[in-house]
Image: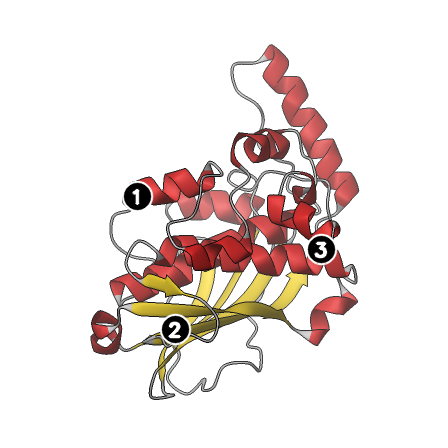
Amino acid sequence: MSVALMICLSGCASMPLQRGTTLSSYQNLKPSNGTMTKSEMSVDPHALAMAKTVRIVPTTISVNVAATVPNLREQALTSNAVDRALCVALSDRFEIVGPGQPADLTVRASIVAIKPTNKTAAGVSTVTSLGTAAVLPVSVPRLPIGMGGLDAEAEAIGADGAQKAAMVWSRGADSFTTAARVSAVGDAYALAGSFGNDFAKMLVKGDTPFKGVGSLPSKQKVWSALGGRNKYTACESFGRGSGIAGAIGGKLGLPPGWTDKKSQANSKT
């Protein structure tokens, strides 16, 4: 058993893979799992290689999510995190166009289920981590209790109306890579970005995103994460990265809505 898998088993939230009802077809999905991610996917590499433009339809929320996360603002915050991650990551390979404009691929995603974060447990984990960091060279990992998770799915539809790629995705938070945030969607928000990046990577590669050697992020991706203007205007509708404020907020365990600029803009409208 690999070290990464042992770490996952000892400090990961359990999140079963669930299919939703939003994909145009589930027929050709095949298992393709990562170290901490469960996934089924299908991909037409030739069709993706020919594509140059992408339109992103805002991510939808399954009606089942209301049972675990009834707060509409928290739902919107999480779904928008998927869209932002998709838009930024896809910009490395495709031109992103706005609503109503013709595109070679139309990407649409849906959040199938959210396992909420236990806010009390997240608060205790944050205090413990900050406390040990003050006296030790490194902070202790997050406590493996009350962690959340996310189930999501997405597809890319060609201009001919046929499905060119699809993915059903599931992941739970873990003690080492998912910072504890005092919010019911603290973990789902972080994992929404991971899902968006994984699906975008599949479209860029024309293959599973869970194999091969990782690469350094592009300059435009780093700039976007720091809160800079997105490469394509169409991505501005999903807001910009929260930058240094978001990184500090994550370390302090603050709810993501406190530093997410898109969330703050939405709260004023």
Q: Residue 164, relative to residue 193: is it above or below? A: below
- Going from N to C along the chain, the mark reached first, 3 or 1, is 3
Mark 3 element type: helix
Residue where numbered disc 1 is placed: 218
Mark 2 element type: strand
Residue where numbered disc 2 is placed: 41
- Name the mark nearer the viewer: 1 or 2: 1
Q: Nearer the viewer, residue 13 or 199?
A: 199
Residue 3 visible to the viewer: no
Q: Amino acid at mark 2?
A: Met
Q: Position of residue 173 (x, y in %)?
A: 58, 49
The CA distance from mark 3 to mark 2 is: 28 Å
Q: Residues within 10 Å of mark 3 (few under 14, many from 20)?
A: many
- Name the mark nearer the viewer: 3 or 2: 3
Q: Nearer the viewer, residue 197 or 37?
A: 197
Q: Amino acid at mark 1?
A: Ser
Residue where numbered disc 3 is placed: 74
Q: Residues within 10 Å of mark 1 (few under 14, many from 20)?
A: few
Q: Position of residue 137 (x, y in %)?
A: 52, 14
Q: Mark number for residue 125? A: none
The CA distance from mark 1 to mark 2 is: 25 Å
Residue 186 visible to the viewer: yes
Q: Residue at x 65, y 37 (%)?
A: 143
Q: Position of residue 197 (x, y in %)?
A: 42, 55
Q: Residue 50, relative to residue 69: is it above or below? A: below
